[in-house]
Amino acid sequence: MVFSSPGSGHPPALSTPGTYEVESSWKLADMVSEAFFQKTRREVDIRPLPELEDQTITRSVCPMELLLGLGKTTSALPGLHLAGAAGLPGLTALRTASRWAIIRYLWAFAEARPDLRLSALTHQVRHHQRSLFSEHFGIAVATDLVEQLILTEPARVVDADAVGYDPVLGPAMGGLGSHKPDYFWYNMRGRNLTDVVVLEAKGNSSGRPTSVLQLARGVQQVLVPKAVPGARMRRIVIGACLAGRRIKGFALEVGEPSDETRGDIAVALAMEEAGVRPRFGDRVRSGWISEDSLATPVNREEVVREAWDLDRARLFTFAGLPPEPEGPLLEADRQAVNALDVVDVDETSFRCETSLINLGGRYLSVRTGVAEDLLSAPGDTEADFEQRRAFYLQGRPGRNSYAFRPGRSRTRPREELSVVTSADGCMLSLSMLD
């Protein structure tokens, strides 16, 4: 396929910042506490996020940043090299785990600003896809708030449904049942697990009252995992409401519960899962659930395996790369690796996979990629990788800030790219081609 000179560049509706509101107030916390008590007959410490200082704030974000976050988080699956459906590696089945989210919502945003608004067409379509649409925007908003406001450095993230594959959190979070939270973000210092963020993301198209009920349900879910001794754990519930064509977020934090309260909540959820009406006088000894089925605290001596390989697997997945490039690959994987592009951004090179979307005479080029510093190389050791990772993170202190920078493709050097990057080494680029 031959392209002429670059067209108009990236779509302006996706790279122009817009604002959405985030409420985190004591009034909201009180309403959620009341809803939680009505459901569980338990009182827990529900409070605003300290980062939001008990107020409603206005977040400025580009749609590309939300799409990048949505793609990253929905591809946070360890163990993708294991055989899955039809005997194929999970990576082959989920190699577009990030790009599908980005491509699906390319046309979701209107160009009008300053508010971040849905396009008129998207606003109509979402009524027929309420649950899925709301869930995805809930994840996008939650990722934005966690990575930009809560975390102080790039962290590893894993989907809670796949946490059993995680060599670090797996031993601590076994037996969570189906009513677990959505995601875990965590940090390591050497061989030590230092910080864990437990997140439940909610979304709806109904309004604030529904968000209050959803947040109360989310409180139950983030209470299920036990604390990890020696690590700071934060339990966060974030919701997104599609009010008309606008997006509004809600965020609360749950204080560390007593073992009794946490156990009661876990038992109630397990009984609910089994179709039994929970009675909060019941305890673990009631026979409905055993201690072994609850998450158990991790022994610090057991947390000896570094998470750098898991983090690399997530980054490989985001870029559509096999997590073990030195191992056996399917022919489709070999072709994909050979067809990779490299985009240079300042002094960093990103290994990318590209999707082209025909727009009737013009093409939209969607690239997802990972910094080459964070990809494995033959003969790599743990020390080698950590040294490259540290080098990449130089100049990116503090928050997981996104950055828009110009880039240049090695396969199409005449094409001017606007690239959004994240501090954990992922990138997204959208461009129009004639």
Image: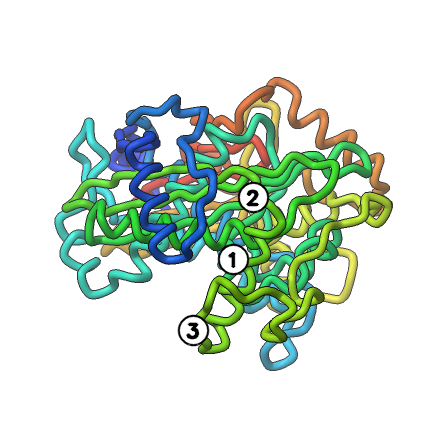
Q: CA distance from mark 1 to mark 2?
A: 10 Å
Task: Say which element carries label 2.
Answer: loop
Number of the label disc, if any, that sits on residue 303: none
Q: Amino acid at mark 3?
A: Arg
**Colour theme:** rainbow
How many numbered discs?
A: 3
Q: Amino acid at mark 2?
A: Pro
Q: CA distance from mark 3 to mark 1?
A: 13 Å
* Marks 3 and 1, the one that precedes in the sequence: 1
The residue indicated by pointer 3 is: 277
* Marks 1 and 2, the one that precedes in the sequence: 2
**Which residue is located at x 37 percent, y 41 percent?**
141
Residue 363 in sight from this viewpoint: no
Mark 1 neighbour density, 10 Å: few (under 14) some (14–19) many (20 or more): many
Residue 363's x, y, as percent?
32, 50
* Marks 3 and 2, the one that precedes in the sequence: 2
Q: Is residue 354 above or below residue 235?
A: below
The residue indicated by pointer 1 is: 265
